Amino acid sequence: QVMHARELSRRLRANGNTTVTVNALHPGVIASELWRNFGVGFRIAQLLIGFMLKSEKDGAQTSLYLALSKEVKGVSGCYFMDCKTKSAAPNALDDLACKQLYDYSIKAVGLDTANNNN
């Protein structure tokens, strides 16, 4: 996710598009209904660590921040958590690896790479 955001942001800027921004985020571990699909073991774990999980409302805050805040206007290609930029994993900061993953993804889904080479 971070690698795709970084590469798409780079490509947009290279084509002169500074209006669209692309960022990646981690909402945190959310106490949601998703847990019910993971079986009894996960439901027991949720009961034991539930006090540490974010509510659905709290988990949405970083997404809302990126969509609505003027503070991040023009910020693109970054990784966010808890409404703040965070350092991504070192592998996600490798520009060549980001480009290769993006190119591979374009091919894997059958899109025309001739229009995506910037």
Image (cartoon, rainbow, N blue to C red):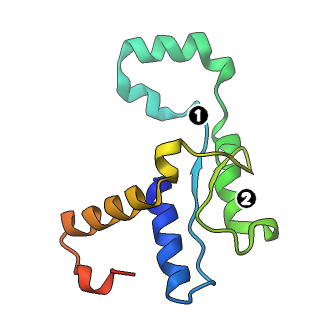
Q: Are marks 2 and 1 in contact (CB under 8 Å)?
A: no
- The residue under the point 25% across, 85% down is 114
Question: Which residue occupies the foreground of this view, 81 or 12?
Answer: 12
Q: Quadrant of the C terminus?
A: bottom left
Element carrying mark 1: loop
Q: Which residue is mark 1?
A: 30
Q: Which residue is mark 2?
A: 65
Element carrying mark 2: helix
The x, y position of residue 68, in whole percent, is 73, 67
The x, y position of residue 45, in whole percent, is 50, 13
Residue 65 drawn above or below residue 117: above
- Horizontal side of residue 43 vs 87, given as left or right: left
Residue 117 drawn above or below residue 72: below
Q: Nearer the viewer, mark 2 or mark 1?
A: 2
The x, y position of residue 13, in whole percent, is 56, 81
- Horizontal side of residue 29 vs 92, given as left or right: right
Q: Quadrant of residue 40?
A: top left
- The residue under the point 69% across, 68% down is 75
- The residue under the point 40% across, 60% down is 96
- The residue under the point 69% across, 58% down is 64
How many residues crowd mark 1 within 10 Å: few (<14), some (14–19), many (20+)?
some
The x, y position of residue 69, in whole percent, is 78, 66
Q: Quadrant of residue 55?
A: top right
Question: Which residue occupies the foreground of this view, 89 or 5?
Answer: 89
Mark 2 vs mark 1: which is more N-terminal?
1
Label 2 is placed on what type of residue? Answer: Tyr
Residue 95 drawn above or below residue 9: above
Label 1 is placed on what type of residue? Answer: Ile
How many residues crowd mark 2 within 10 Å: few (<14), some (14–19), many (20+)?
some
Residue 77 - label: none
